[in-house]
Amino acid sequence: MAKTNRLARREAAQAYIFLGPSLLIFLVLVLLPVLFSGYLAFTNWDFASGFKGIQWVGFKNFVKLRTDRNFNFALQNTFIYTVASVPLTLLISLMFAYFLNGKVFFQKVMRTFVFIPYISNMVALALLFRCLFRSDGIINSMLTQTFGMKEGLKWMSSNDLNKIPIILLSTWASIGYSMVVYMAAMQGVSESLYEAAAIDGASSRQTFWHITVPLISPTTFFLMIIRMIAVFKIFTSVKVMSGHVTSRGNVSLIVKIYDDAFGNYKFGYASAEAWVLFVIIFAATLLQFWVKKKWVYD
Amino acid sequence: MKKKKRTSKIITTVVIGAFSLIFVLPLIWMISASLKPNYEIFNYPIRWIPNPPMVQNYITVWTDETMPFGLMYLNSLKIAVFTIIGKLIISAGAAYAFSKMRFPGKNFIFILFLASMMIPTQVTILPRFVLFKELGLYNTHASLILPALFDVSAIFLLRQFYSAVPIDLSESAVLDGASHFRIWAQIIVPLTKAPMASLAILALVTSWNDYFNPLIFIVSKNKYTVSLGINNYTADVYVNMGLAASVSAILPILLLYIFCQKYFEQSIASSGIKG
């Protein structure tokens, strides 16, 4: 008995050696910051004033958020980015996954074409999109010289339009990922179902809508959540495309948090904003799990 | 019948091919524009093949001493290498503890780790910034490497692979003789090279393309990463050089993708299916 005890203790000690580095980094760089951030959200702290400058203000930050116009613009824009980009991404990647799974020639080359933006540096892509969408850029030249529009559009400076290039960019850069996930899911659908459908005389369109789409709906659900969370945290594309000068038309939540924290050194307020972001992501995820029960096939 | 099928496949190829071409056209334009003088870049109709190609853009980007892009390249490479090696070793160790060892607090810690996946980096980044300032790690590459070493999804993925390796550790011979370290290093790790390769690729791409963390933690130009380097060319006068820097940043990952396509897609598919 004493021997097994000793062995168990030795194993536990060894286990903590294996786990140690991860655990240490988790405690110091994740758990501690989460707790500290939770505390900061209820304080007023100009980082430049040092630890002594931390003032407890209770819920004041959260109250202030409700009337902060820029925060509300950021919230609204982030919602629009999500609602526009996620369905677009899923639809296009579903289409590519379907056709690049044995229905065309040269599918490997095409797959590479669609995949490249996903692994490319976002700063580089955003810089490229700035060139395409600036007032004398390629898109406007195309619109005026090829499609006969009288004048180009203000893609970057108009608060009504400047979300569009960002939506296109984030969609373009994420389709490769969703396409690969969809392809894996489609290969998992049993061949016998397609054979049965073919015997019953189903057209390929019917097979797609009544077999493929319902059977891969868990994947659609997974991608929806993953993409939603990703777009909710949209930052680089907004920041770089706007040349680090965002407006109420395109500012996103993370950009606002970044600007408050590192532009104005309002660490308490920025922490409160970060927690609101977390709560929204969390709530949206829960909501989707609830909705999942109603339409996902499994 | 067969002939009809072939015709329809050709038509689909043309349509989908045109669609997928739209995806690379901006990138092809970028390469072409990066080889042009500034005043020619926005000319329309687009002249796809620059004549003569202005290789000078690349030479300037790579050798300019005020904006040492070559050095930033090396910095990014260094950060990626340390991150990959560290992350793989640390995650593999943790995964082994979670799948093959018994110790008090195991489930609690595991759930805590999983729960932390929900927390966006943006919540932890401000305290991390404060902490790094206090510890003197601000404006060092360690501030980018250290947080990246802890990766719950890597631990989780490897744990699943480890659980599939049938080793009965309750046998006393194992406990007395070979240590856990040897079982891990000599049996399990060699058996799970494929998921490790996928994780390495994923870690490389994430680290190489990261912008948010370097933007916050790095201020000195000689410590910049590639992402910060490109961002220095946003001014209008530098358009062609900015594009040359962008192409330089994308190219190594693209080449790697062409040679290790399998691992790229595996790294995604495994996260996708198990997610």
Image (spheres, helix red, strand yellow):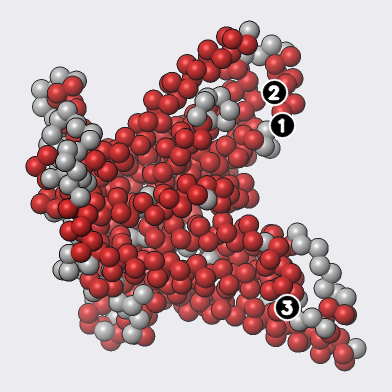
Which circle marks residue A190 in the picture? 1
Residue A45, image quadrant: bottom left
Left or right of B35 on screen, residue B92:
right
Question: Would residue B94 be visible to someone looking at this image?
Answer: yes
Residue A259 placement, left or right of A88: left
B245 over A80 or under it: above or below = below
**Residue drawn 75% across and 59% down?**
B164
Q: How many marks?
A: 3
Nearer to us in this view, B47 or A102:
B47
Q: Residues within 10 Å of mark 3 (few under 14, many from 20)?
A: few
Q: Label 1 sits on what residue type?
A: Ser
Q: Quadrant of the C terminus of chain A?
A: top right
Disc 2 marks which residue?
A: A194
Please determine if labels 1 and 2 lie on a single subunit. Answer: yes
Q: Which mark is residue B182?
A: 3
Q: Residues within 10 Å of mark 1 (few under 14, many from 20)?
A: few
Label 3 or label 1, whichever lies nearer to me, is 3
Q: Are marks 3 and 1 on the same chain?
A: no
Q: Is residue A50 above or below residue B254?
A: below
Place residue A92 in its image quadrant: top left
Q: Output the chain of dot 1.
A: A
| Location of the N terminus of chain A (image quadrant) | bottom right
| Helix, strand or loop for disc 1 | loop
Q: Amino acid at mark 2?
A: Tyr
- Is residue A278 among the parts visible in the rendering? no
Is mark 1 in CB contact (under 8 Å) with mark 2? yes
Estimate the x, y position of residue B71 in percent, counting from the top left: 28, 69
**Residue B144 on image: x %, y %:** 39, 71
Q: Residue at x 41, y 31 (%)?
A: B20
